[in-house]
Image: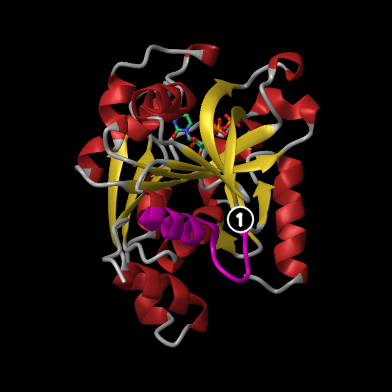
Amino acid sequence: MPDVLIKKCLFPAAGYGTRFLPATKSIPKEMIPVVNNPLIQYGVEEAMAAGIDSMAIITSAGKEALKNYFELNEKFEQQLADGKQLDQIRHIIETCNFSFAIQEEMKGLGHAILTGAQLIGDDPFAVILPDDLCYAPEQGVLSQMVDLYMKHQCSIVAIEEVPQEETNRYGIIAGDEIEPGLIRITDMVEKPDPAQAPSNLAIIGRYILTPDIFDIIRDTPPGRNDEIQITDALLTQVKQSGGVLGYKFNGRRFDCGTPPGFLEASNFYFENQLY
Ligand code: UTP
């Protein structure tokens, strides 16, 4: 067995969460609970299940609740010493190392990832967008991707088929299927209109990135919506190395960045007692 090479996971969580206003005036979107666990906790647990214990969270001013959540709280610890409800979060805090960086301006996902460069260093790393909640009972989605990384040693993005009329909500890829469910990417476009989309294969919020991506992002100009897009940086990586893979993961994704997706996830997690 090779050493586990992916040791850190980056969580971009600096966005304004405008689709959840007014709640997100004072509650970070990532702290809104699906049943009783904050959304970000499911992402951290998925990273832990992939063998990762170093979590780097990108936040912004006013989102201090995220940092507080991953610290022991004396008051609760003393008053609820036997509180079963705190066992899991206590275990997470004791097992994992958390670091934080502030994204001063919301200049896009690529920029948020670059903000984490110092926290990550010079190793390949994982990225989880906490608002994509992934349910995969046999093996977590990130764990599936870490296994693939061990074999292919290149950047990997999780993809899924979306209805053609929704391509303008995602980064869309095109490429050649090299084995079932695994695509060597040749093209990528951020939020293309359905008529211009090269496929209906959308990138969802799970990535494994090689650290050369940081220099590439530094040289990536603002793209769609005037934001620095990770999709544009990954396309440069495709052209430079030819080795970026799209992976049709096993599992079900809930788009918790929108109220309908959040509600669907909440119902599913409640009905199946997954909290
Ligand atoms: P979204 O666009 O879905 O999140 O970005 P948002 O901006 O918070 O939500 P809306 O659109 O205003 O409702 C996907 C992920 O990338 C992070 C977000 O926090 C979210 O987890 N992100 C996005 C950043 O950290 N920084 C950015 O500049 C942009």
Residue topped by disc 1: 134
Q: Position of residue 235 (x, y in %)?
A: 45, 24
Q: Which residues are magenta?
A: 134-151
Q: Nearer the viewer, residue 170 or 244?
A: 244
Dominant secondary structure, magenta: helix
Residue 136 in magenta?
A: yes
Q: Within 8 Å: ligand 1 and the Cβ of disc 1?
A: no
Q: Residue at x 66, y 27 (%)?
A: 169
Residue 180 in the image: above or below residue 257: below
Residue 35 in the image: above or below residue 228: below
Q: Is residue 88 left or right of residue 198?
A: left
Q: Secondary structure at mark 1?
A: strand
Asked whether residue 27 is in view, the answer is no
Q: Amino acid at mark 1?
A: Cys
Quadrant of the snapshot with the N terminus: bottom left
Colouring scheme applied when the structure was drawn: secondary structure
Q: Residue at x 38, y 69 (%)?
A: 92
Residue 266 in magenta?
A: no
Q: Is residue 202 left or right of residue 147?
A: right
Asked whether residue 59 is in view, the answer is yes
Q: Residue at x 79, y 34 (%)?
A: 163
Asked which quadrant contains residue 135, the reply is: bottom right
Q: Position of residue 247 (x, y in %)?
A: 56, 46
